[in-house]
Structure formats: C-alpha cells, structure tokens
C-alpha cells in the first residue's frame, strides 16, 4: 500500500508538471517571451562581436596570436635564457647573489628618461629547464622573486611557494633543479649544504634532450588607484631585472662548454632591433642575466563570455515571463482552479518552478550554444585576440549561463508567488539579480564594494560565465569590471540557486498559510 501511495504521489507530481507545461505552451505571450529572450541573447552578442575590431598595424592589421602553452591556454613566454643542452637526467645548481631592477617612470621633461631602482614583486630569476627555446613549450623552473619568496613554477599555470624573503649579497639564495625522467624537482638552500625541496613537476612532454640554465624576467610594475567615480585606474610601467649568479654547477650529459643566450619572445622593432632587449655576460665564474617580460598565462585579450553581452537584457525578459506565469493566475482568479486540480499547494508551486526552469534552460542553452562559437569566430575575423579555453570550459560557460537564466527564472517565479503582483515582483527580481551585476561591472562602485556585491547577492551567479581564472602569480587587476568575479564559477551559481530555493520555500509557506 505504501509503495502504491508513493507511486501515486510521483504520478501526481508528474501530472502537475504536464499540466503546467500545457498551460505554458498554450499562452502565446509566454512562449514568445522566451523566444525573444533567446533571440536577444544571440542578436546582441553577435552585434557586439561584429562591432569589436582590433588592429596592430601589421601587414594585414591582425594582431598576432599569443603562444599557446602545453595545457592549451594562451601564455606570455618572454624572458632571457642562458642555457646549455642536457640529454637525459641531470641537474643545475647556482647561487643567486643579487637581484636588482629598474622601473621606468613617466618623463617629467621630454626626452629625459626617469627610472626607479627597485625590483617589482613578480620579477623572477633562477634556474629553468625547457623544451628548446620555442615560446609556449613545456618547462619547469625554481626561482627567487622580487616580493614573493622562492617559487617552483611549471607549464605556466602551476605555482608552488617556497620560503619567503629576498636576495642580497649578505643573504644569497642557493637554487637547484634536478631532472629524473619526467620529474623535475626544485630545491633551495641558504648555505648550499642543507637543501629544502620546493616542489616537483611532472613534464610528460619534455623530450630527452632539453635546454637547462639560468633565466631572468620582469613582468612590469602595476599600480592601481581608485577612480573618482568608482572603479579603478591601472597603469603598467616597463621594468627589468638583473640577476647575478655564481657557483654554477651542471651534472649529467651536458653538450659543449659555452653558454648560449636567447631572448625568448623578444619583440622586434621595424628595423629588426630588439625592443627592450635582455642580456647575458660571463666574467670568470660570475654570470649576469638581464631580463624583461614574464613566463605566465596570458590575460590580455577577449574571452568567450564577451560574446554574451545580450544575457543581461534577456534575463529581464525571462524575469517578466516567469513572474507573469504565476501572477496572471492571481489576477484572473485562475489560481483557485490550479489548486483544485493539485490540492497540495507546495506541489503545484514546485511544478510551476520545474516548468519555468526547464523552458528557460532550453531557450538559454539554444541561444548560448549559437552565440558563443559564432561570436568568437567573428571576434577573431575582426582581428581580436580571443583567449583560448578548453572545450570543457566552453561547455561550462554555455550550459552554465543557461543554468543562470533558469535559476533567475525560478527566483522570479517565487517572488511572483510571494508578492502576487507583477510590477512589484518584476522590480524586486531585477533589483536583486540584474542591478547588482550592472553596478559591480560598470566601474560605478569601488572595487571592493563591487566584489562584496557579487558575493552576497543573487548576481553572484554571473560568475559561471568567467572562462579565464585569476592567477595569483600573474600581474593583473582582477576586478569585476575586467570580468573577474570574487567567487568561483560554480560557487557563484550556487549562491543564486540558494536564493531561488529560499524564495521558493517562502512562497510555498505563504501559499499554504493564506488563501489563494
């Protein structure tokens, strides 16, 4: 008997969902509204992509695509490399005795260059093994930094912290990099006797013969100042770092006796000269390496979510449809008929939520699945650099935005059931979902206020569309106005879903406690 009752309950809910679906698809205005939301997503997204053009002044005006790392991400691979060829297992050891730098300052007098002598926080100098000198090739490095202590980094995205502290003549850093098959292990020491492991990287793509040696890089000096009317103003100044090594030792099958110097990723001027060249010189057992640039994931360029500018407008349409799908029944008195057909009021509301969520998700998925690939293709055709992402990330953006729209629709439906008046419910839904996102991303609020707004409100759900993560070891201004959200993608969506569930529970409580 109990199994029969459970089956009946399940069948009752299924019939309630079917009834709500039949009701929804027979109201032409609701169907047209969902179609309009999908169309707005596509049209505004493609229009934005069509209007975005970039020119770098080359032969075909197209900007050169950045190199791609082993994981398929766009990378910056620009540093000076003093190297030898190692075949098979082996190691390199060196003492880093000095790490100094220069930062270019704005000229006060035209033609009079101003520099400040200091090392930027993410300047890097140390030991590296790399698959040749091609940009984007696999590598592992152990290094000292300007302000973040010793680090072990590999393949651009991986970063492991060692001991804190800087480098000076009175406090040098001993570094060692050891290859054993595919495993590359970095060590540090204060005296060259007692060694501490920093980290180990497994480089499956590293060939038996690789380049190993010393390097230096300096990514630039980032300054961020609050703007007068919200947001921030950022400026990146050119910088370089100079590293001095001694006590350099190599083990294993190392070819030749001379060190070779390569300015990896150097930018050349029209005449062929290197723009801001690095350098290398050897004096007895002392080696000086001067480097600019960085070895890190690239963050400059368009991202796939830039094609989804129509989602905010589409969300407003979705909110209107979701609210009207319940408030119209109160306005016309049809809610009593609905509750007679489904006496369990919570079940009736849940059926409405399932239908509005399903319809919105289907419309959103169709729209984003068209907009993202077509929009990114248009951006590239217009000369823009579009930062590549994995197919899993692209699927997450496409399906995640559809889930965002569905969760917002359920929240709007619940608010409609709570307020029972369309204008009040639509206004409330727009205020809690759309307005915080606009305020946070339009440089209207201070950056920290914008971050908190996107942590605490339903607008946190927009984090699901972020395709490029914020890398702690990469110099950038990670703010909402630049497309970086304070919560991880799925965590942000979970906040929105939590609000939708809470609102639905409150609406069910009111529906059960008060007359329809």
Image (cartoon, rainbow, N blue to C red):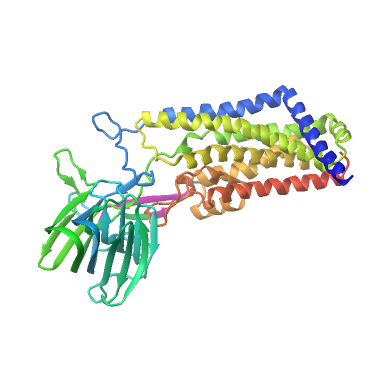
Residue located at (85% from left, 39% from top):
8
Please tell me which residue is depicted at 26% across the width and 33% down the height of the picture: 57
Residue in the picture at 85% in, 44% down: 3
Residue sitting nearer the eye, 154 or 467: 154
Residue 417: x, y in percent? 77, 40
Quarter of the image with the C terminus is: top right
Left or right: residue 331 compared with residue 223: right
Quadrant for the N terminus, please. top right
**Residue 142: percent from the left, percent from the top?**
31, 62
x then y, percent, for residue 421: 77, 36
| Highlighted magenta segment, given as a residue range | 224-239
Dominant SS in magenta: strand
Percent across and percent down for residue 113 are: 19, 54
Q: Quadrant of residue 41?
A: top right
Can residue 105 be seen at all in this image of the molecule?
no
Report whether residue 418 is seen: yes
Residue at left offset 47%, top offset 27%: 47
Q: Nearer the viewer, residue 319 or 461?
A: 461
| Residue 474 as seen in the image, left or right of residue 9 | left
């Amino acid at each position: 008997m109990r199994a029969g009752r459970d089956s009946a309950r399940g069948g009752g809910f299924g019939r309630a969902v079917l009834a709500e679906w039949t009701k929804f698809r027979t109201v032409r205005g609701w169907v047209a509204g969902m179609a309009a939301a999908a169309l707005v997503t596509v049209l505004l997204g493609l229009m934005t992509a069509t209007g975005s053009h970039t020119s770098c002044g080359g032969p075909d005006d197209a900007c050169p695509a950045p190199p791609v790392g082993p994981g398929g991400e766009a990378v910056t691979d620009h540093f000076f490399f003093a190297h030898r060829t190692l075949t098979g297992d082996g190691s390199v050891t060196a003492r880093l005795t000095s790490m100094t730098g220069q930062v270019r300052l704005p000229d006060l007098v035209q033609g009079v260059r101003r520099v400040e002598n200091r090392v930027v926080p993410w300047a890097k100098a140390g030991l590296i093994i790399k698959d040749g000198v091609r940009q984007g090739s696999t590598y592992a490095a152990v290094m000292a930094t300007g302000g973040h202590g010793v680090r072990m980094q590999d393949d651009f995205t991986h970063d492991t912290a060692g001991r804190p502290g800087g480098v000076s003549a009175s406090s040098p850093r001993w570094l060692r990099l050891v290859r054993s098959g595919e495993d590359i292990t970095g060590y540090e020491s204060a005296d060259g006797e007692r060694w501490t492991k920093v980290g180990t990287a497994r480089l499956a793509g590293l060939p038996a013969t690789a380049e190993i040696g010393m390097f230096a890089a300096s990514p630039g000096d980032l300054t961020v100042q609050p703007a007068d009317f919200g947001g921030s103003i950022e400026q990146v100044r050119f910088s370089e770092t100079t590293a001095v090594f001694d006590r350099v030792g190599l083990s294993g099958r190392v070819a030749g006796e001379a060190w070779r110097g390569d300015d990896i990723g150097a930018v050349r001027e029209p005449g062929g000269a290197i723009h801001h060249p690095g350098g290398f010189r050897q004096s007895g057992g002392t080696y000086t390496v001067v480097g600019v640039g960085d070895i890190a994931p690239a963050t400059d360029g368009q991202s796939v979510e830039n094609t989804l500018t129509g989602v905010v407008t589409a969300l407003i349409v979705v909110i209107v449809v979701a609210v009207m799908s319940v408030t119209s029944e109160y306005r016309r008195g049809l809610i009593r008929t609905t509750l007679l057909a489904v006496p369990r009021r919570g079940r009736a509301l849940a059926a409405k939520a399932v239908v509005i969520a399903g319809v919105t998700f289907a419309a959103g998925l169709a729209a984003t699945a068209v907009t993202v690939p077509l929009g990114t293709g248009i951006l590239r055709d217009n000369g823009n650099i579009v930062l590549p992402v994995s197919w899993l990330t692209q699927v997450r953006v496409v399906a995640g935005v559809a889930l965002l729209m569905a969760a917002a629709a359920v929240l709007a439906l619940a608010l409609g059931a709570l307020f029972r008046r369309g204008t009040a419910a639509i206004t409330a839904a727009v205020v809690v979902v759309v307005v915080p996102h606009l305020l946070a991303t339009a440089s209207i609020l201070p950056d920290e206020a914008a971050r908190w707004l996107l942590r605490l409100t339903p607008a946190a759900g927009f984090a699901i569309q972020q395709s490029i993560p914020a890398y702690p070891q990469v110099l950038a201004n990670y703010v909402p106005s630049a497309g970086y959200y304070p919560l991880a993608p799925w965590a942000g969506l979970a906040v929105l879903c939590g609000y939708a569930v809470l609102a639905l529970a409150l609406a069910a409580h009111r529906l059960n406690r008060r007359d329809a």
